[in-house]
Image (cartoon, rainbow, N blue to C red):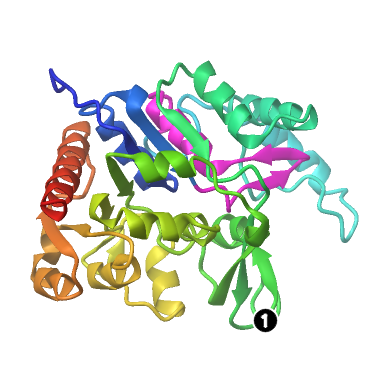
Amino acid sequence: MIANKSSLSIVVLAGGVGAARFLRGLALVNEAKTTTALVNTGDDTVLHGLNISPDIDTVIYTLANAIDGERGWGLSNESWRAMDALKRYAKVRPAGSVAAPDWFNLGDQDLATHFYRTSRRAEGADAWQITREIASAWSLEQQIVPMTNQDVATVVELAQDCPAGKAGEEISFQEYFVKHKHQIAIRSVRFVGIENAKPNALDQLADADVIVIAPSNPIVSIGPIRAMPRVDETLTKVRSKVVAISPIVGGHAIKGPAERMLNELGHESSALGVARMYASIAATLIIDNVDAHLKPAIESLGVNCVVTNTIMSSPEVSSALAQTTISSAVNNSKAANK
């Protein structure tokens, strides 16, 4: 624990597991009440009639020290009796029915969050208000902000015939990621409803002391946030204060489908490939020690490159990464303003 935390206004563009671990480290070095997580909601889904926000819940559970650390999602000490009981109805489900899906596990405790979110939505509360209430219930001081109050759905287009469907068909991101374990080829990603999405916390983003692009999937975690109107425009204006952390280490994703998606969608699965995607909006990229050889190529793009340990294997590593991130942004911003 750092004795004297900074109290900078920090906004973190966040996906799920990687972002949550970074935010947990950030809480050790910067005041929680001055930290805002702007979280992807493009992979939100509705199952069993329940509104589910996987990235938001992962961030909240992690910051509340309630996450299942082994899985990286869901609650610790979870039970699965409801899911087990659901199997009884799957065998009587008529052809064409989507009732009783059992490919997306919801723990018994986790269900309470989805019950609450769904009920509040039915009462007319918007996503930001509901998220504020859920975060408060978990005693969090950080502002956890859904990227928008409007519904946005990430869908992927299949590249070839497979169990998920025919080439050219689209399926939801959760079907791709969970049901098919991201083991099917895709040829495009689309964010349905993004043109009507009004970004939340845009003023906070413009006025922040430091902006961090967490080590999350650039395409389906950070991509939806950037795709909303005015977000990239705002980031470009404050580029000197923006630091991105590469989610690709040694050419591979730490977790999830980022490596495969980057390769299939025409990007390079490397820290350099990430730098190319973020160069217009981030003045600094933090990469892992194993990718130190890429630093000259990254800096040739006009991006400052900081090399450190980015594998958040412990709270100590996470807090050290957070401190390095803050220092990099502050130093670069000072240099830009000279």
**Left/right of residue 14 with respect to residue 179 in the rendered view:** left
**Does the stretch in magenta take in 55?**
yes
- Where are the magenta residues, as a range? 40-68
Residue 265 place in picture, x, y as percent: 46, 78
Magenta stretch encompasses residue 41: yes
Q: Residues within 10 Å of mark 1 (few under 14, many from 20)?
A: some
Instruction: State the SS at label 1.
Output: loop
Quadrant hosting residue 7: top left
How many labels were placed on the picture?
A: 1
User: Hey, which quadrant is residue 234 in on the image?
Assistant: bottom left
Residue 8 shown left or right of residue 309 in the figure? right
Q: Is residue 36 above or below residue 181?
A: above
Q: Is residue 16 left or right of residue 112?
A: left
Q: Position of residue 1 (x, y in %)?
A: 16, 21
Hey, what amino acid is under mark 1?
Answer: Gly
Quarter holding residue 293: bottom left
Q: Circle 1 sits on which residue?
A: 168
At 22% from the left and 41% from the top, the residue drawn is 313
Residue 318 rendering spot, x and y as whole percentages: 22, 38
Q: Residue at horizontal 9%, vertical 73%?
A: 296
The x and y percentages for residue 112 are: 64, 24
Q: Is residue 194 left or right of residue 55?
A: right
* Residue sticking out furthest to the right: 94
Whether residue 67 is visible, yes or no, is no
**Residue at (16% x, 38% y) in the render:** 323
